[in-house]
Image: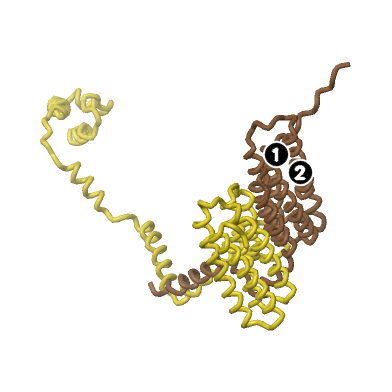
Amino acid sequence: MNCKAVRTHLLQATDPGRPSAAVAEHLAQCPACRQWQDRLRQLADALPLLPVPPTTAKADLLCKLEKIPVAPRRPVAVVAKPSRLAAFFNSPAFPPAALAAGLLVFAFTWWLLPTPRGVPIAQGPRRPAPDPLLASMMQRHLELARAKSPGARLTALADLADDLQKETQALALAEANADDLDVLARLYVQVVSQGVAERAPLVPEAERRDLLGPIVNRLEQTSKSADETAGKLQENSAAKLQIIASAAREGMKQLKALQQTGERP
Amino acid sequence: MNRFVLPLAVLTLATVVWADSTPPLLPGEKVERFHKNQKLVKALVEHGLDLAKQDDPIQRAKQCGSVAEFFAAEIREAAKRRDGYRAAELSALLGTLLKTGVADNLRSLGPNVAPESQGMQEMLKIRKQVDKLTRPLEDPIVWLKDGPLTAPMEEAQSAIRAAREEVERVVPAAKPVAEKGL
């Protein structure tokens, strides 16, 4: 092994102080190479002690890494989705599709809301409107059930009479037959003669002026309105409304007498 | 933006139509309803006139109890025909009648009615009467005779049950008479 080969080996060695057997044999015979080995070893030992100047290289490197563009596969996938969505929104198929979807949502909501799911409906999907006459009669009945004073009872009876006459006129215009109108007209007569006129004298005198005045006015209005409606109807039906008009006039007469003299005529 | 206008307009219109799903009765329907409800209307008016003459809460409760019998009979008929909506409508009214007309009048007597008094005996009779007319309507057999229970039928049963329970709260059941020793 010559000197050049030995020195090349020493430069490549991890530790120049521990050479291989062939290199060590040459060093033992060659003082120049031993001296060269000593200088190399000193240099290697001193290298870690050298001062390191301040540097921005690391920061610069990280900065460069951040600026490197994203890997090619990923951006392709991200860009592809919105472009397809945008294409759908812009396509001519969108408005009909949106309309169909909206109707589907509405139909589903319609089906879902009126009745619990899975419960069969014997009468069809729509609940019929409640009977307003029955509801108002019940309301007046309950007012009478609650009313403790004669004044409260008189007011409830007058309201009941009003509801009956309004309903009779509405049914007459709806072409109800004369028998139906007769039932309601007779109920009206009962309420005015056995209810309003009989109960009014029991109202304390101090309350009469405030209570009776409005009721007299309502009876007067009823008699006029029933006469007017009767004029538009056939003879049989008109006769039933005239019963109402007549009962209203009679009730009015009795209440007016009570207002003036304090007694029923 | 224009492409949203048509679907939105259709949805809005449909919602408006749907919201008004129980329109008022048509003239023909009014007449038909009157035929159906004539007995009940007469009972309400005639017993209402009697109510106006009564000062005693027990007698007032009795009057309301008498009207309740008319309603119970009509509900039974509706149940037989499986007319759930009619049963529900009448049951709601019956419930209000029992709660306001019967229970509230009896409640107005206060808690001081002596257990052995005539008043308490009358109250217990009313409780028994209410029980007799409502219990059969709560029995599923009445409703399930010819088909499954529908939502309006359940609604009707529930209104009736709630009203009976209200009357029972106001008039607790009579305590059994203690057996006398030999």
Which residue is drawn at the image coordinates 55% and 66% (left, top)?
A: A218
Q: Secondary structure at mark 2?
A: helix
Q: Position of residue B24 (x, y in %)?
A: 60, 69
Three-letter amino acid code of the residue under disc 2: Asp
Tell me the brown chain: B
A187, above or below B2, in the image: above
C-beta proximity under 8 Å, tags 2 and 1: yes
In the image, A60 versus A166, the foreground residue is: A166
Q: Position of residue A68 (x, y in %)?
A: 26, 53
Q: Residues within 10 Å of mark 2 (few under 14, many from 20)?
A: some
Q: How many marks?
A: 2
Residue A135 in view (yes/no): no
In the image, B159 versus B146, the foreground residue is: B159
Q: Which residue is mark 2?
A: B131
Looking at the image, tell me whether mark 2 or mark 1 is earlier in sequence order: 2
- Residue B101 is marked as none
Q: Position of residue A92 (x, y in %)?
A: 45, 77
- Residue B168 is marked as 1
Which residue is drawn at the image coordinates 57% and 75% (left, top)?
A: A224
Tell me the yellow chain: A
Q: Quarter holding the C terminus of chain A?
A: bottom right
Q: Chain of mark 2?
A: B
